[in-house]
Image (cartoon, coloured by chain):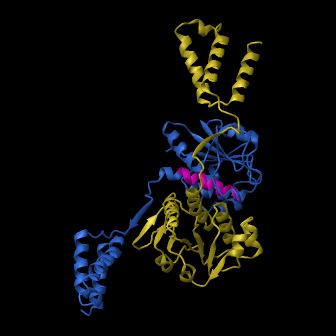
Chain colours: A blue, B yellow
Amino acid sequence: MLAPVVILVNPQMCENVGMAARAMMNCGVSEMRLVAPRENHLSEKAIAASSGAEKILQAAKVFSSTREAVADLNIVYASTARKRNMIKEVLTAQGAGGEISQKALGGIHAGILFGPERTGLHNDDVALADKIIEIPLNPEHCSLNLSQAVLLVCYEWYKTQAVAPDAQMVTNGAPFVEKEKLYRFFDFLENKLSDCKAFQDDEKHPKMMINLQNIFLRGELTEPELNSLYGVINFLSGH
Amino acid sequence: MLAPVVILVNPQMCENVGMAARAMMNCGVSEMRLVAPRENHLSEKAIAASSGAEKILQAAKVFSSTREAVADLNIVYASTARKRNMIKEVLTAQGAGGEISQKALGGIHAGILFGPERTGLHNDDVALADKIIEIPLNPEHCSLNLSQAVLLVCYEWYKTQAVAPDAQMVTNGAPFVEKEKLYRFFDFLENKLSDCKAFQDDEKHPKMMINLQNIFLRGELTEPELNSLYGVINFLSGH
């Protein structure tokens, strides 16, 4: 899958370039381009900050203008924190992640511009872009640093590539209990409790049993867990 | 809306605590709890790193154990990077963000545990949690720092609160052109081009006009932009 290119325009501190590379690597985005960086992106500081993403820094190409840096790309997004007085489509990071993926299926190669730390992108650079990315954040306090902005945008792209289910019970290979085995366990439990006071009361008995069943039904039990429950109850009941 | 509580378990460096506060503030999450932090979270370093989120650090409560730190919460998520040998439901950050929001509607107050920088959460702390959050990232290189993990999880929660459309054309108040006005512009353009060579060819003429129309139709033009186009064409055609 064609990943987007991350273009850092006039980054000020080389550590931030390193941290941006780290963020990219976490999200499977590998091509970084730099427009007139103030510091050396291959300095020791930058490499230390990249925390293992040195490869990205070493492969990063340096350009003297934004226009040259995006020359071979098909679509360019400008990541901005503040509103610009321009008529352009504005996407959330999520919207952009989805769109970049979709367009890549049609062979459209995307680049994402990120501006210098203090000021953000200059209007002339935003003007070069097709669209704007604004990350929806707390309007009362929005202060992302460069690598965090890179992280969120790349993360949204990566999510469109990843196939992780939103929620999944992880059993490390233990099989989930088949329902009949669980019902048999309920019978076993009911039998073990037959002498208890509440179970003598014909009205309370079924209600209490249903409550107990629901506890275990909610648990999505695995076979080894069910065996443990048998063990515990046998132990507690003295055989 | 009931925001989740962020619980940092044994954070090592106070700058990371400050940066985590900054990440939280960006996402409208304000309650931080600390379990036995190694350094002072109100040190100058921590406050500088929080970049304006000092309020969160000042309000942060310190506990001596994770168990005490989550005592009043209803559901606890453990954020982990590596697989644990435990049978628990595993959610993505996105899945957890949605679930935390949904549960909050029913009055369920959630906490999210984050472990120390180098090692991540101890198994004993993961065991206290109801569920696990694993952020889907590049399996070949996953190295999030503490504040980045806090950022991604809080961001996913914040997105469930925000109502930003995924994509939106921003015109800064300029009205979009009504279709009839655009069609009249097409007529005007066709008229201006009537003498050009391709328009003399009866086969090419309609095809070319449709191509030109499509360029402007894709543009989602505003009224001032349409006026500019009239101006440009009038200028080019010499009156």
Residue at x-position 56% and y-position 11%:
B205
Can see residue A54?
no
Horizontal relation, residue B232 to residue B136: left or right: right
Horizontal relation, residue A211 to residue B58: left or right: left
Q: Main secondary structure of the magenta part?
A: helix
Q: Is residue A148 magenta?
A: yes
Q: Residue furthest front?
A: A203
Q: Is residue B45 magenta?
A: no
Q: Name above or below for residue A129 compared with residue B67.
A: above
Q: Name above or below for residue A138 compared with residue B209.
A: below
Can see residue A39?
yes
Q: Position of residue B58 (x, y in %)?
A: 72, 75
Residue at x-position 58% and y-position 16%:
B209
Region of the chain picked out in magenta, as a range: A141-157
Q: Quadrant of residue A87?
A: top right
Q: Position of residue B1 (x, y in %)?
A: 58, 64
Please give the count of numbered marks on the rendered protein.
0
Q: Nearer the viewer, residue A170 or A201?
A: A201
Q: Nearer the viewer, residue A26 or A167?
A: A167
Q: Quadrant of the C terminus of chain A?
A: bottom left
Q: Name above or below for residue B11 compared with residue A195.
A: above
Q: Position of residue A165 (x, y in %)?
A: 43, 58
Q: Quadrant of residue A118?
A: bottom right
Residue at x-position 57% and y-position 68%:
B4
Q: Name above or below for residue B128 compared with residue B232.
A: below
Q: Position of residue A75 (x, y in %)?
A: 60, 37
Residue at x-position 43% and y-position 62%:
A167
